[in-house]
Each structure stands twice: as structure tokens, then as C-alpha cells.
Amino acid sequence: MIKGYPNAQAAETVLKTVREFLEEHKNSFDRIIFCVFLDVDYNLYKQKMPIYFPFDVVPPDSLRGKSNTTDNN
């Protein structure tokens, strides 16, 4: 918890807000990056992300097989 805001609640708020924004602006972005600094936050996002961004949606061809840590320019 940083600044007194609970980590789990912060993750829920961020994921919900981004999901709602993308539903109305789905063609505005091709990538969203969630940057976290604490292991607890990483684990929360990893756990909660499939709820807001289900894996049953096939990613575009441009994202298949790319690493999550580097860009292949």
C-alpha cells in the first residue's frame, strides 16, 4: 500500500477504468502497458487482468509471438 490506498482496490480501479475506456475507444491504441513497481502489484495485475481482458479474444497477428519485454523493430 502506497499513500494509504489499498493495492488490490487500486488494481481493480485501474483495470476497470482502462477496460471501460477501451470499449469506447477500441481503435485508439494498439498497446497498453501497465507499469508496476512492487511484486504484490505485479501479482495482483497478473491475477485480475484475465477478468477484465479475457484470453478468449485472439490477439491481432501483429502481437502473436512477440515478447512482452522487448520490441522487435
Image (tube, rainbow, N blue to C red):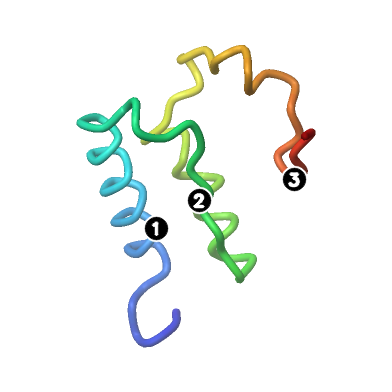
**Figure quadrant of residue 65:** top right
Q: Residue at x 62, y 12 (%)?
A: 61
The alpha-carbon separation of the residues under discs 2 and 3 comes to 16 Å
Q: Tag 3: Cα neighbours inside 10 Å, few (<14), some, or many (≥20)?
A: few
3D distance between C-alphas at marks 1 and 2: 6 Å
The amino acid type of the residue labelled 2 equals Tyr
Disc number lying in front (2 or 3): 3
Q: Is residue 49 above or below residue 2?
A: above
- Residue at the (76%, 34%) spot, across then down: 67
Q: In the displayed structure, does residue 10 sit left or right of residue 68?
A: left
- Tag 2's secondary structure? helix
Instruction: Locate residue 73, reporting x and y percent.
Output: 77, 34
- Mark found first going from the N terminus, 1 or 2: 1
Q: Residue at x 47, y 14 (%)?
A: 56
Please give the residue where the numbered disc 2 appears in the rendered image.
Answer: 45
Q: Nearer the viewer, mark 1 or mark 3?
A: 3
For the residues bearing labels 1 and 2, Cβ distance under 8 angstroms: yes
Question: In the figure, residue 23 lies in which quadrant?
Answer: top left
Which image quadrant for residue 43?
Answer: bottom right
Q: Is residue 36 above or below residue 2?
A: above
Q: Secondary structure at mark 3?
A: loop
First-in-chain label (1 vs 3) = 1
Q: In the visual, does 38 lie left or right of 50?
A: right
Disc 1/disc 3 C-alpha distance (Å): 21 Å
* Amino acid type, residue under disc 3 in the picture: Thr
Horizontal relation, residue 30 to residue 62: left or right: left
State the residue position of label 3: 69
Residue 56 versus residue 23: which sits nearer the camera?
Answer: 23
Image coordinates of residue 21 in percent, x first then y, are 25, 41
**Residue 22 percent across, percent down from the top left:** 30, 35
Dot 1 corresponds to which residue? 11
